[in-house]
């Protein structure tokens, strides 16, 4: 998960949530990493002031009501919201991990075993949504977050109640992601059925396994023609042979030819068991394969610490401030380490450095010595202080370091990590 610093124009607090950085944006709004007064991380979605009007508020209020309605282990839960605020916002559970789009772009497609596990998990999650009388309507790789407890579905901004012909969009207007959209949705048909989410899930699984979507075109009109033309089959190139039959069914042009979600789960289980695994084992492998770097969120939220300047004997080369390299003292051991001066360029993001990620399954170098995973590298996280100094009393909430102080501390940690020998 990329977390960028706040800009000078960003709010620093909304609804009691302290905003720590940016984690996403779109045409309608911005998503921030927030922290509640009790320390609960949250994804805080805020509508841009330039697009706040009565229709936007109505659509945003609908999203809030839908998030209040749905539940399930695969759904990012709603924590709080205020659609009537000057800047409408909502806060949902924060999932520490990449979305599927970034995962595949950074680390390549998933093996068929892990794709089948992803399919079984998401199909079961969507089935729970459908049982509550809802359709997602905008499932795509960017709306699947690969968290430490398995994948979760986000962004129900376009969700609607099943069998409903009511829409907030203008007549003859199609809303959604065309490359993951089934033909009936692209044609503006109403009412839509659960088969729209089956098709979108098929597109997501194809992307996970092959690295591309069923239809691709630079021109939006050409793309819509491909999606709606029954004579243009989806591009399944690069998909593992064992997944092609299931993907073909899920991406069928006619809604009635697509399998039900329960059947998708059954077929994914069969694919997993055919490779000698149980579905729970495949789930654990998927989570391990896509896990975000451990304790990165802790590093971001750690209290800022002022760098310690070492005492340098007079006359040594390091005594000249024009040539002396930067240094940092480990507050736990008192050891001072000198950092290379060419590593001081600020980084554009705060986490998600590929060098700190664990290697994908099957790519470990057998000649490399095993590295313990229990303890983080020294310097990335501040050691516990056995005797903390007394803190100033706050008025109604605990004192916290400013967002800029946190950013500065994080950059110091990154510089230290880049120059360390581990």
Image (spheres, helix red, strand yellow):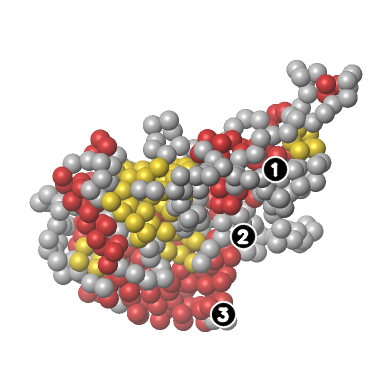
Q: SS of the residue at dot 3?
A: loop
Q: Quadrant of residue 78?
A: bottom left
Q: SS of the residue at dot 2?
A: loop
Q: Of label 2 and label 1, which has the lower sequence position?
A: 2
- Mark 2 touches mark 3? (CB < 8 Å): no
Q: Of label 1 and label 3, which has the lower sequence position?
A: 3
Q: According to the image, label 3 marks what residue?
A: 277
Within 10 Å of the Cα at label 2, are there few (<14), some (14-19), or many (20+) other Cα atoms?
A: some
The span from disc 1 to disc 3 (Cα, nearest Å) is 38 Å
Left or right: 268 in relation to 230: right
Left or right: 265 in relation to 320: left
Q: Nearer the viewer, mark 2 or mark 1?
A: 1
Q: Of label 2 and label 3, which has the lower sequence position?
A: 3
Q: According to the image, label 1 marks what residue?
A: 417
Tell me what residue is drawn at x 64 percent, y 57 percent: 358
Q: Nearer the viewer, mark 1 or mark 3?
A: 1
- Is residue 332 or residue 298 the one in the foreground? 332
Q: Pinpoint residue 400: horizontal percent, then vertical percent.
A: 53, 43
Q: According to the image, label 2 marks what residue?
A: 360
- Mark 2 touches mark 1? (CB < 8 Å): no
């Amino acid at each position: 998960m990329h977390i960028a610093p706040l800009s000078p124009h960003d709010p620093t607090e909304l609804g009691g949530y302290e905003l720590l950085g940016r984690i996403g944006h779109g045409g309608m709004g911005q998503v921030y990493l927030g922290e509640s007064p009790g320390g609960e991380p949250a994804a805080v979605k805020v509508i841009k002031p330039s697009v706040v009007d009565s229709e936007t508020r109505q659509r945003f209020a609908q999203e809030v009501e839908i998030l209040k309605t749905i539940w399930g282990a695969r759904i990012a839960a709603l924590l709080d919201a205020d659609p009537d605020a000057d800047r409408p916002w909502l806060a949902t559970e924060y999932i520490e991990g990449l979305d599927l789009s970034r995962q595949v772009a950074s680390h390549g497609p998933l093996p068929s075993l892990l794709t089948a596990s992803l399919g079984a998990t998401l199909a079961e999650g969507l089935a729970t949504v459908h049982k509550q009388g809802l359709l997602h309507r905008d499932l795509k790789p960017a709306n699947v977050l690969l968290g430490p407890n398995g994948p979760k579905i986000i962004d129900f901004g376009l969700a609607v109640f099943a069998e409903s012909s009511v829409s907030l969009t203008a007549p003859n207007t199609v809303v959604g992601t065309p490359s993951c959209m089934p033909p009936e949705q692209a044609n503006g048909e109403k009412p839509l059925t659960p088969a729209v989410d089956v098709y979108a899930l098929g597109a997501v699984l194809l992307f996970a396994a092959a690295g591309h979507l069923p239809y691709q075109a630079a021109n939006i009109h050409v793309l819509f023609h491909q999606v709606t033309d029954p004579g243009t089959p989806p591009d399944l190139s690069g998909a593992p042979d064992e997944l092609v039959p299931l993907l073909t069914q899920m991406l069928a042009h006619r809604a009635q030819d697509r399998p039900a979600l329960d059947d998708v789960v059954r077929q994914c289980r069969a694919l997993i068991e055919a490779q000698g695994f149980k579905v729970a084992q495949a789930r654990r492998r998927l989570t391990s394969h896509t896990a975000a770097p451990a304790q990165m969120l802790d590093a971001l939220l750690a209290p800022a610490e002022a760098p310690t300047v070492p005492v340098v004997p007079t006359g040594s080369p390091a005594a000249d401030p024009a040539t002396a390299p930067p240094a940092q003292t480990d507050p736990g051991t008192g050891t001072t380490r000198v950092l290379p001066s060419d590593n001081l360029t600020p980084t554009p993001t705060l986490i998600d450095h590929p060098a700190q990620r664990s290697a994908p399954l099957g790519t470990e170098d057998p000649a490399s010595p095993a590295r313990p995973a229990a303890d983080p590298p020294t310097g990335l996280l501040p050691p516990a202080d056995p005797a903390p100094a007394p803190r100033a009393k706050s008025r109604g909430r605990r004192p916290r370091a400013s967002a800029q102080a946190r950013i500065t501390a994080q950059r110091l940690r990154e510089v230290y990590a880049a120059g360390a020998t581990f």
